[in-house]
């Protein structure tokens, strides 16, 4: 089953995402900021990365940039979790190399649909 | 004691149904009472408030406490006060013997539940009683406080004074036992 | 599938309260003239998280309110709006407001929104008032009207119909950016999505593929002509949503049946039309996403709105007032966060305990006297394990005092503003740990002492300058461990306690007489007496002098002490001493007659055998001990506690000098026994409070021993003294 890395500094958000994805049969690991996520990504091999934008230590945009420099993650789908008001963040994310985005707030079904769309 | 005895009190033939009925039945509200002897009188307390029965053991005295508070004991890690009921009733204290018994009760107060032990002469029996079996204590006027008496019951020809344990152990003044005794034996 | 989101609510509330605390802390640190970017970012992130979570979990009112808060913070951190003090105030008030709303939601009540609406209006006024330098939002809206007419001409049929399975198809030209793969996007994936909409056919356009030796394997040089016989325009747009900005994309509806011509050979079909049209097409599609994007959030909103009413609907029928009061007054929570390291250490200790137990079990199974030494070693090991385990467990309940300290910056800020005083708050020793319950209960007394320093201690700026002090006063909270206790000091550099006034007030109230000679410390101690207050007016802030004695009583209930040191004109220091845990006491066992009592070790100064030459008699009845340069009154414990002692004569027993409330007293006992840690058991739980006794404990032999309350004993002794000495004291 595909392995997903869920990154968000909000514990409740991480819990919800993990619960939703695990329920659909995915393997999930969590990280609370970009640095943690980067470390985990290097140690594991994820098929998809889901990341919030605003996080301490290293934000989502920087995380995308860093991931894209890693050989294993050049083509890995990376989805940003972003709020609708942050139009420029979407652009920044794309420029950093993100695959796409999911708009917050989202409900579990929307999350699953998007993930399934990407992972096929 | 066995169910048989409980049933014999109500004069019914023993049967499985009757057993069920007498123990906490729904229609004729039955209560079970543990009775004990003190100064030749038989008293009863609601069995639901009885936590356990122990033999007497030395209690640590509490300074500046009334004489009927013998002290506190260690009940599996909890500090529990022991009250001598004779002294509480203003009767003479007797020497404690191997059959002296402490009944540990759960008492409900406005501040919550307390666990208190009472020293009695001896434990008697457990009886099942319905509301019909009980009668109210006679009016004694304002002089005598009888709130601590739940009622009187006639059990096998004996008079049992049923105590309202919450009232008894929360009472400020001494109950007037003599007056009560007289009233009972009238 | 539908997931019940309410299972995440509790975590959301907890992290939101933490987020609000972090916002408050950051806001208090903010200096408008020179603000730290990282602080603003932290505040912004906290608000952003709360908004995101609130929206996700269905608390739309919170999301909406937090949105304006976040917007202001965003402008400030982006530098497009200058930070003003008024903003900080508004933000702090909104933090308070959010806390209340969240608390209501957590309790299952309907939150009171009037304040939030009011604040929201204020935010909107601020945001609208001075235009920020960002105007991108207006650009977007300008675009769409221009775009529409063209679209209408070209694609009027699609949006209206929703064009499903009718006689037509989408003709799509898609040339992704060369880097499309490097963003993790896969054209093939998109084609699969299109396939789901209707019959899908495609033809790759290879004209841009370079020579092999120039080929970058990770780049995409292909374009495609595609026909999809179904789907709405929205659905097609969605497929390309993520790549549209970096791609050439043209989508048009064609009636009829797709033919080979639509797919072309190697040329993009749409490019057959004039170059101008191509340019138009591309520009069209660039503008469209703005619409598409603005449409999508609406559908999301609609969904969250339907799910939102539920959490707030299910409120219990209990009266709101009592619930609110209950939750507001008790800051106590029923859970505690524990570091994993503490848990691991605990698990290790239990492991060792199990080993020791099994070793002892084996020894016991076939015991003979030869094995005695090993048994004793095993028992020593057991004692060691148990003690370690005990320490480990106690540490679990310990939290850093920063949790309590954290409420003070806000308190000092608000009150100093109210009183027109300038006050700096310094916090030291925030990492000092203490028991969670002790910490929760020490909060209120500390607040009272700090308020007292704010109100009566620190002078107004003019007064300070006149006294040669810096205009800004300083209040310092200092916490540290000392000898098995935690010490908390509240230090101010204000005007100190006015001994004359205290003394005259005390005499007026009959607490002391004019003839008494009191040391400075004893005079200062008088402020802890009930009914004592020398404040000129009864100020709202510190109350009616019901403060200090209640403070001391609260602290004593925690088995702690509070004392004051003060120098007029310089300042005051209140020192609170608390045991590290409520449950355990270091005790000195003493014997009086047949009974064993426990004296708190922390109160004991020294013990000595009495030499009658050291004893004086005052007033014929009360013995005092001459100890170096002071006189210490003697209290005979056997009298106080009504026990038959072995000795009535002082010289045959022992005197234990103890201290409480800044006064010393010598307790007369028969014998000193061991010192040990005792577990404090409540006497009040099943019996009642007994004067002079603070609790009970169970000794090794299973018997109950009473713990002496030193302060209480002193009080009783003083009362007795009053009664026996002929009347220079009036009743206290």
Image (cartoon, coloured by chain):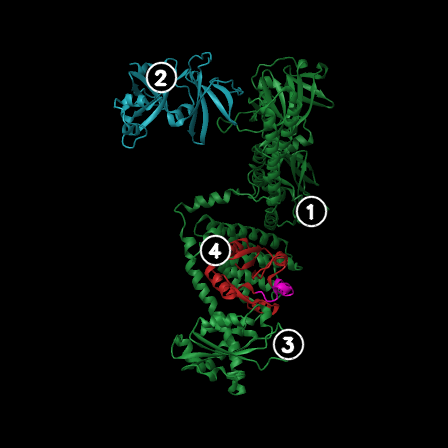
User: Mark 3 and mark 4 in contact (Cβ < 8 Å)?
Assistant: no
Which residue bears the numbered disc 1? C464
Q: Chain of mark 4?
A: A
Front: mark 4 or 3? 3
Q: Chain of mark 3?
A: C
Do marks 3 and 2 both belong to one polypeptide chain?
no
The front one of C178 and C359 is C359
Residue C292 vs C678, above or below: the answer is below
Left or right of residue C553: residue B17: left
User: Mark 2 and mark 1 in contact (Cβ < 8 Å)?
Assistant: no
User: Mark 1 and mark 4 in contact (Cβ < 8 Å)?
Assistant: no
In the image, residue C257 lies at what x, y percent?
Answer: 41, 81
Which residue bears the numbered disc 4? A23
Q: Provide the residue span drawn in magenta.
A: A61-76
**Element type at mark 3:** loop
- Among the chains pictured, the one given cyan colouring is B
**Element type at mark 2:** strand
- On whether residue A67 falls in the magenta region, the answer is yes
Which residue bears the numbered disc 3? C215
Mark-to-mark CA distance, 1 and 2: 79 Å
Front: mark 1 or 3? 3
Q: Colour of chain A?
A: red
In the image, residue B137 lies at what x, y percent?
Answer: 31, 21
Q: Colour of chain C?
A: green
Which residue bears the numbered disc 2? B42
How many marks the image carries: the answer is 4
Badge 4, how many Cα within 10 Å: few under 14, some, many 20+? few
Mark-to-mark CA distance, 4 and 2: 66 Å
Badge 3, how many Cα within 10 Å: few under 14, some, many 20+? few
């Amino acid at each position: 089953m595909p392995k997903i890395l869920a990154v968000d500094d909000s514990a409740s958000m991480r819990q919800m995402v993990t619960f939703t994805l695990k329920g659909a049969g995915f393997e999930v690991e969590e990280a609370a900021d970009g640095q943690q996520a980067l470390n985990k990504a290097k140690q594991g091999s994820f098929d998809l990365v889901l990341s919030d934008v605003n996080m301490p230590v290293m934000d989502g945009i920087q995380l995308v940039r860093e991931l894209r420099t890693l050989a294993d993650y050049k083509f890995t789908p990376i989805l940003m979790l972003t709020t609708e008001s942050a139009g420029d963040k979407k652009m920044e994310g794309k420029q950093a190399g993100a695959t796409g985005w999911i708009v917050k707030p989202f409900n579990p079904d929307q999350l699953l649909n998007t993930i399934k769309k990407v992972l096929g | 004691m066995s169910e048989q005895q409980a049933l014999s009190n109500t004069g019914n033939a023993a049967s499985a149904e009757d057993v069920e009925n007498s123990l906490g039945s729904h229609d004729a509200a039955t209560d079970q009472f543990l009775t004990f002897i003190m100064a030749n009188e038989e008293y009863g307390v609601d069995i639901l408030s009885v936590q356990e029965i122990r033999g007497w053991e030395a209690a640590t005295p509490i300074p500046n406490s009334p004489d009927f508070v013998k002290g506190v004991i260690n009940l599996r890690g909890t500090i529990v006060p022991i009250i001598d009921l004779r002294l509480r009733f203003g009767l003479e204290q007797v020497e404690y013997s191997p059959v002296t018994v402490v009944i540990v009760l759960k008492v409900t107060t406005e501040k919550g539940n307390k666990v208190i032990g009472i020293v009695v002469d001896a434990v008697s029996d457990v009886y099942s009683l319905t509301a019909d079996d009980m009668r109210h204590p006679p009016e004694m006027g304002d002089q005598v406080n009888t709130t601590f008496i739940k009622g009187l019951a006639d059990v096998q020809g004996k008079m049992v004074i049923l105590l309202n344990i919450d009232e008894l152990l929360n009472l400020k003044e001494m109950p007037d036992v003599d007056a009560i005794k007289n009233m009972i034996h009238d | 599938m539908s997931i019940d989101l309410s299972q995440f609510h509790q975590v959301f509330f907890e992290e939101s309260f933490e987020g609000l605390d972090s916002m408050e802390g950051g806001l208090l640190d903010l200096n408008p003239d020179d603000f730290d970017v990282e602080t603003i970012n932290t505040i912004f992130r906290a608000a952003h998280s709360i908004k995101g979570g609130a929206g996700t979990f269905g608390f739309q009112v919170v999301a909406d309110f937090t949105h304006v808060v976040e917007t202001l913070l965003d402008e400030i951190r982006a530098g497009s709006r200058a930070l003003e003090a008024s903003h900080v105030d508004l933000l702090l008030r909104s933090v308070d407001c959010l806390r209340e709303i969240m608390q209501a939601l957590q309790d299952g009540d309907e939150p009171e929104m009037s304040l939030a609406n009011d604040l929201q209006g204020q935010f909107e006024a601020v945001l609208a008032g001075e235009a920020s330098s960002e105007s991108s939002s207006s650009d977007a809206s300008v675009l769409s009207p221009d775009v529409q007419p063209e679209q209408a001409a070209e694609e009027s049929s699609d949006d209206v119909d929703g064009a499903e399975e009718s006689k037509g198809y989408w003709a799509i030209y898609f040339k992704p950016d060369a880097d499309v793969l490097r963003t993790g996007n896969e054209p093939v994936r998109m084609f699969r999505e299109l396939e789901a909409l209707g019959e899908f056919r495609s033809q790759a356009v290879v004209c841009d593929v370079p020579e092999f030796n120039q080929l970058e394997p990770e780049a995409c040089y292909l374009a495609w002509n595609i026909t999809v016989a179904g789907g709405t325009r929205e659905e097609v747009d969605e497929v390309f949503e993520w790549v549209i900005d970096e791609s050439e994309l043209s989508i048009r509806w064609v009636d009829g049946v797709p033919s080979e011509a639509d797919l072309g050979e190697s040329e993009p079909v749409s490019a057959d039309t004039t170059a101008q049209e191509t340019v138009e097409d591309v520009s069209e599609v660039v503008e469209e996403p703005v619409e598409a994007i603005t449409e999508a959030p609406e559908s999301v909103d609609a969904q969250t709105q339907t799910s939102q009413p539920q959490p707030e609907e299910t409120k219990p029928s209990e009266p709101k007032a009592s619930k609110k009061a209950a939750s507001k007054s008790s800051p106590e929570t029923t859970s505690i966060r524990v570091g994993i390291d503490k848990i691991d250490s605990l698990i290790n200790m239990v492991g060792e305990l199990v080993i020791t137990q099994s070793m002892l079990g084996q020894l016991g199974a076939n015991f003979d006297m030869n094995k005695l030494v090993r048994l004793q070693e095993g028992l020593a090991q057991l004692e060691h394990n148990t003690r370690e385990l005990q320490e480990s467990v106690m540490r679990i309940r310990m939290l850093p005092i920063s949790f309590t300290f954290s409420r003070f910056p806000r308190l000092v800020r608000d009150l100093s503003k109210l009183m027109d005083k300038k006050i700096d708050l310094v916090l030291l020793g925030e990492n000092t740990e203490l028991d969670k319950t002790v910490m929760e209960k020490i909060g209120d007394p500390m607040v009272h002492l700090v308020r007292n320093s704010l109100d009566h201690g620190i002078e107004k700026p003019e007064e300070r300058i006149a006294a040669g002090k810096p205009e800004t006063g300083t209040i310092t909270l200092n916490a540290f461990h000392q000898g098995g206790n935690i010490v908390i000091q509240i230090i101010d550099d204000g005007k100190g306690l006015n001994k004359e006034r205290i003394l005259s007030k005390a005499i007026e109230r009959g607490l002391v007489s004019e003839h008494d000679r009191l040391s400075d410390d004893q005079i200062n101690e008088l402020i802890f007496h009930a009914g004592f207050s020398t404040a000129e007016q009864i100020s709202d802030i510190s109350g009616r002098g019901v403060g200090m004695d209640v403070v001391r009583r609260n602290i004593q209930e925690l088995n702690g002490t509070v004392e004051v040191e003060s120098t007029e004109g310089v300042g005051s220091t209140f020192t609170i001493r608390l045991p590290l845990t409520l449950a355990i006491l270091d005790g000195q066992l003493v014997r009086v007659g047949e009974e064993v009592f426990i004296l708190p070790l922390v109160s004991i100064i020294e013990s000595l055998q009495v030499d009658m030459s050291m004893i004086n008699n005052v007033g014929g009845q009360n013995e005092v001990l001459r100890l170096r340069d002071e006189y210490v009154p003697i209290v005979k414990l056997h009298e106080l506690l009504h026990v038959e002692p072995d000795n009535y004569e002082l010289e045959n027993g022992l005197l234990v000098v103890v201290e409480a409330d800044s006064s010393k007293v010598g307790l007369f006992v028969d014998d000193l026994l061991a010192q040990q840690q005792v577990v404090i058991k409540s006497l009040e739980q099943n019996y009642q409070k007994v004067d002079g006794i603070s609790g009970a404990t169970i000794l090794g032999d299973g018997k109950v021993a009473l713990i002496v309350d030193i302060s209480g004993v002193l009080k009783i002794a003083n009362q007795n003294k009053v009664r026996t000495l002929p009347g220079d004291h009036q009743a206290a």
